[in-house]
Image: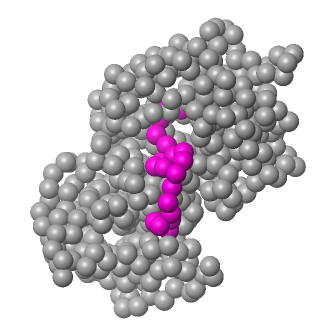
Amino acid sequence: MPIRPVRVRNAHVTLRPTLVHRRLATLGSRRRALPLRSRGGASRIIALLLAPLALAFSGSGVHRTFHGLAGTPPMGWNSWNHFACDVSERLIRETADAIVASGMRDAGYRYVVIDDCWQIARDSAGTLVADPTRFPHGMKALADYIHAQGLAFGLYTDAGTHTCQGRPGTLGHEDHDARTFAAWGVDYVKEDWCHAEGLDAPTQYAKFRDALARSGRPIVLSICEWGTNQPWEWGPRTGQLWRTTGDIEDKWPSMLVNLDLSAQHAHAAGPGAWNDPDMLEVGNGGMTDDEYRAHMSLWAILAAPLMAGNDVRAMAGATRDILTNREVIAVDQDSLGTQGILVAEGPPEHQVWVKPLRDGARAVALLNRGSLPAIISASVERLGLRTDSVRVRDLWVHAERGTLTRAYRATVPAHGVVLVRVTPVARR
Ligand code: GLA
């Protein structure tokens, strides 16, 4: 579809010609421009009028029929962010136990994925060998253990000659590795892109997709080439998720970079095909709990995979509460499968992000990227809800905020978010 120029009508605030314009340009072929109006002047009250969202989202995967893997964004846990190469059978078993005991499994976390460094060599038959010191009972036994907990099992490999940590890669062994993974009971494979010089990403990932299909076991394919070969163009026909960014770090600016990068490709996401801004850092210690709540909320707005990356065996209560907030998870997992978008920003650091939900409600995140608390206001006047009033529920405080007709306004902590569900209550 050609991208039409965006016309901003009735604009009283000059949009920052950066992210919003790129976003509007990306979605411009299917949406109207968004009117913004400043009410607060020098005060810290920013009024942000929301777009007619029914139009805004009308082409973004909403009407796809989906039958297959990852109908909603995959959820689970991955070893890399916290443990890097320090993986073992014991860690994975204890983690699976903790995912069950903490309530994470029942909240939806399903895939337990061992990232790089589990593999040590290939044997004389060409089969990948798990490090026998760290995984003395082998991968099949570990998969059986994980399945017995009501969880699913994932492994990491690399499309090139070696993994990023120098372990054997899958290049030239696609069918053999797919068969091996299927025989072990693997349900999810993350395929990385190190040591892949000279290879064509769409071709290599399609090769592995086909090998997985031939293995006869339904296996989620997580494409991990860091957004370097426009995976949002070929990812939807190749795997169930594709990284849109480099590796996340457990720092506020890194989380925001990954948010902004992944946000540019909302049009590509839908049931069975998800932009992946990388795994969660919630609970790893580099951000405040407000920052982690924002991280979790924004991943939910983006319909991003929710792969926890912390030590779940020893997590604080606050971390558990963030990861298992079912109202926030329900936003991420909403069956409509539409990736939310940035619809307005006042000063650049005060933003409104919106995700339409299956029942016609909207999840709305008021994001304060700044380092002082701020009042951010989202007008309901043009939510595209054909309604005179809306009911607002705060998804972190778990409280109704009343029925409103004009705007929802909240104080948002520095580096924080207020996440609400806005439901139409009276139709015109
Ligand atoms: C790359 C990936 C990370 C992780 C490491 C493992 O950097 O992007 O997510 O898998 O490799 O070596």
Tell me residue 77's x, y (percent).
49, 32
Q: Considering depth in this image, is 242 or 365 the residue closer to the camera?
A: 242
The residue depicted at 68 percent of the width and 27 percent of the height is 181
Q: How is the image coloured?
A: one colour
Which segment did they paint magenta? 60-78
Quarter of the C terminus within the rendering: bottom left
Looking at the image, is 278 positioned above or below residue 176? below
- The quarter holding residue 419 reads bottom left
Looking at the image, is 359 positioned above or below residue 151? below
Tell me residue 176's x, y (percent).
79, 29
Is residue 95 one of those drawn in magenta? Answer: no
Q: Considering depth in this image, is 4 or 218 the residue closer to the camera?
A: 218
Quarter of the N terminus within the rendering: bottom right
Q: Please indicate, yes or no, whether residue 144 appears anywhere in the rendered image.
A: yes
- The quarter holding residue 34 reads bottom left
Q: Considering depth in this image, is 278 or 290 the residue closer to the camera?
A: 278
Looking at the image, is 238 positioned above or below residue 82? below
Looking at the image, is 333 positioned above or below residue 404? above
Q: Main secondary structure of the magenta part?
A: loop
The residue depicted at 41 percent of the width and 59 percent of the height is 336
The residue furthest left is 402
Tell me residue 189's x, y (percent).
63, 36
The residue depicted at 56 percent of the width and 21 percent of the height is 143
How many numbered discs sit on the rendered protein?
0
The residue depicted at 62 percent of the width and 43 percent of the height is 222
The residue furthest bottom is 10
Is residue 77 one of those drawn in magenta? Answer: yes
Q: Please indicate, yes or no, whether residue 40 appears anywhere in the rendered image.
A: no
